[in-house]
Image (spheres, rainbow, N blue to C red):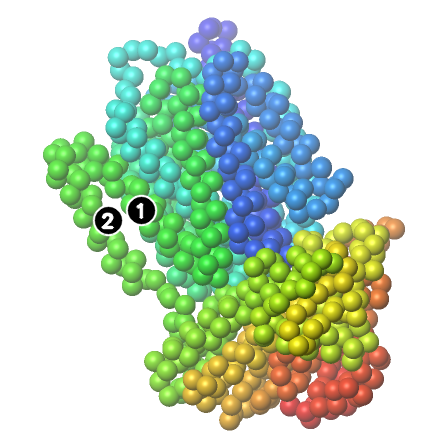
Amino acid sequence: MSTADIHTRDTRRIFFAILVSGIFITLGIGLFSFTIPLLSLDEKVSGIWLGSAFAGYYLAKMLIAPVAGIWGDKVGPRLPLLLTTLIGCLAPLAYFLHATLTTLYAIQFILGLVSGLIKPIGMATLGGNGPKQALPRWFALYSMAFNIALFCGPLLGGFLYLDRSIKPPLLGLSLCMGIASLIIVIFLPKDIRTIKMETTAKTQELSRLDALYLLLSIFGRTLGIGLLTAFYPILLTLKLGWSGLGVAILYAVPSFTTCLGLALMGRIQNRKPQILTIVIGMLLSASALFALGTSTEPWHFVLWGAVMGLGTAISIPASMVAASEMSRNQGMAFGTTQIVAGLGFLLAPLLGGYIVQTFHSVAPALQFIAAIGFFSCIPLLSSGFRDHLYWGTALSWSAAISCGVIAIIPMYFLSVQPGTPLTASGKDIYRFTDVGLGTIINLTIKAKSQGAADKASQKAIVVMRMLQKDYDHRNMDGSIGRINRGAGQYWVTPSDRSYALIRRALQYSEKTGGAFDPTIGALTTSPLYYALDETLARLKKGLVDHSLVLTDDENKRIRLKKQGMALDLGGIAKGTIIDAAVALLRKQGIQAGIVEAGGDFYCFGDQDWTVGIRHPRSKDVYKTLTIREKGICGSGDYQQFVTVENHGKKELRHHIIDPSDMSSANESAGVTVIADSAEKADALATALFILGPRRGKEIMSREYPTASAMWFTPDLRVIATDNFHSSH
């Protein structure tokens, strides 16, 4: 066998090892990264916390990139790749030893290190060992394989997360990393390097200025990708009301389209990188990202996701070839590229988390980051005009800036501001959708004009957000957050509205015999509390007792008697906020309407409204009711849950905790309550779910005779109070 044949064989082995191991690594990271936002949404984790988790991933990825490049140039790629994949294989197993949200975020940080090492070394290996004439095709195939894995990762993640347990995705991640390790051991030669051997004059390098422009545009692109990775599943879930596999399919559309685009593009130019090709692809991606923020229908997400994928297919291979021309030392070249990319990935979740937390919506974050991505391409666009159209510097910059200004116009008109009606139904009836209270807010308003409806809806949503901040225990500056901080130490003066709400909550506790107890926050303020070992939950039982909440009516102060106690008004506050929004709409002259948040609502005004009750084991409507001037709220074991193995049997653990034994309540599968206020319906829905139909009917008859309820029992029998069919 000739030396050339041996070289060709080794070259193919290198390409195979990098390509296939990269597929499995990306598949594992993709399936895990997809499930983290869904898990955080299930746990009502704040946007800032979720953004910080992804920022930790991208920070690790960015910090390790220069080390990865230097390490690969010095010792070759085999040892770094092997050690990194082994770490990636073992890290997910830590959750099985310590099952907390903190552990998951630590795993995500470790995956940032893994990804930050693997990607620059893998690309440097291709750049340093691939034949010059084949390098564009290598990078195109590498990008296609990478995006196939990105497409399959969320699908696999959505399938593994069907039971809303994070353990199957973690095992999938570990398996993918293990397979990648085996591929590297078997196929990657020991003596390869990441430094180009070609030193002829034909080797072209980007000018320093063009390299700087390229890095700036890459920063803008990764800013958008980082934001989409962290918040796109949440946007899809909130906008469409979908979950699991449906969200995964839409999430994967950009990657799927990228794969098709790369397959159809064929061979890209192998001479000097076509800068305009890079820019066109990046501008398409930025425009599509902006449009995704305005989307409301499934076909919108399919269309703009496909456009984003097409832009990626156009820009990524060309930009990889361009990056390989920045230096002969491929590790250094791709290490520098990954630093810049990592900076974009790092800042995107932090900035996006802040925007989501401020506006209570993912859409403004996508639109703002898309605008940054668009304008980061302008310097490279001016360079393209200069090199390919042979324009002067002034003309090139003027043309590039003009393109940016022109793009602002359609972007402005595409923007959907909070309170803009998305659909209209019937005469003088307007519908508005927004995000808040950890779910979707829907306002259906009957008004004399669209202007009146716009004004009233905007004020209602502002009030709902304001009250949420005051009542939410996760807001350390809100009334409940301050009370919890002072537990066992000092009196706290909350807002007047919070004090009044706490007093009413304590009355519900008394009348329901402690089934409704706001001090359950000693347990429920911990992330993934219902997945904790039940022994740990029972240790907090001494902190759950509504009689330990001390009140001072004269000074309107609250004190929690024991350190470690905490209030969680999640079982009542949503109803309170809905009632407040209804009251405000009435003051604004709204004749009738529905205020709905996450399936709980109040119907008001001089007309009847038809509403549906969901079956707890399907998305079907079990029963429709005609309602007027009533609040309807429900509780169910299907809203937040995990499935665990207990003595060889599967056991459902959900978020509604019975204070009597500190475990998930098991007397009901679902309950719907109709009352004269959403607050009462909300509080009673929680209590009656815990009590079950037998004890619940006794409480209703004695304490709340004008309210009514219907239960689904664990064996799916339907039991209702005698007045359920007549009270509405």
Q: How many marks?
A: 2
Q: Position of residue 100 (x, y in %)?
A: 70, 46
| Residue 621 versus residue 361 in the image, above or below | below
Residue at the (32%, 62%) spot, across then down = 414
Residue at the (70%, 87%) spot, across then down = 707
Q: Is residue 645 visible?
A: yes
| Residue 111 versus residue 683 in the image, above or below | above
Q: Position of residue 89 (x, y in %)?
A: 66, 32
Image quarter for residue 44?
bottom right
Amino acid carrying label 1: it is Phe
| Residue furthest to the front | 554
**Which structural element holds mark 2?**
helix
Amino acid carrying label 2: it is Gly
> In the visual, does 640 lie left or right of 539?
left
Which residue is under mark 2? 404
Which residue is under mark 1? 374
Looking at the image, is mark 1 or mark 2 earlier in the sequence? 1
Tell me whether circle 1 and circle 2 mark residues in contact (CB < 8 Å). yes
What crowding class fits label 1: few (fewer than 14 Cα within 10 Å), some (14-19), or many (20 or more)? Answer: many
Q: Position of residue 316 (x, y in %)?
A: 38, 36
Residue at the (75%, 72%) spot, across then down = 516
What crowding class fits label 2: few (fewer than 14 Cα within 10 Å), some (14-19), or many (20 or more)? Answer: some
- Image quadrant in which the C terminus is located: bottom right
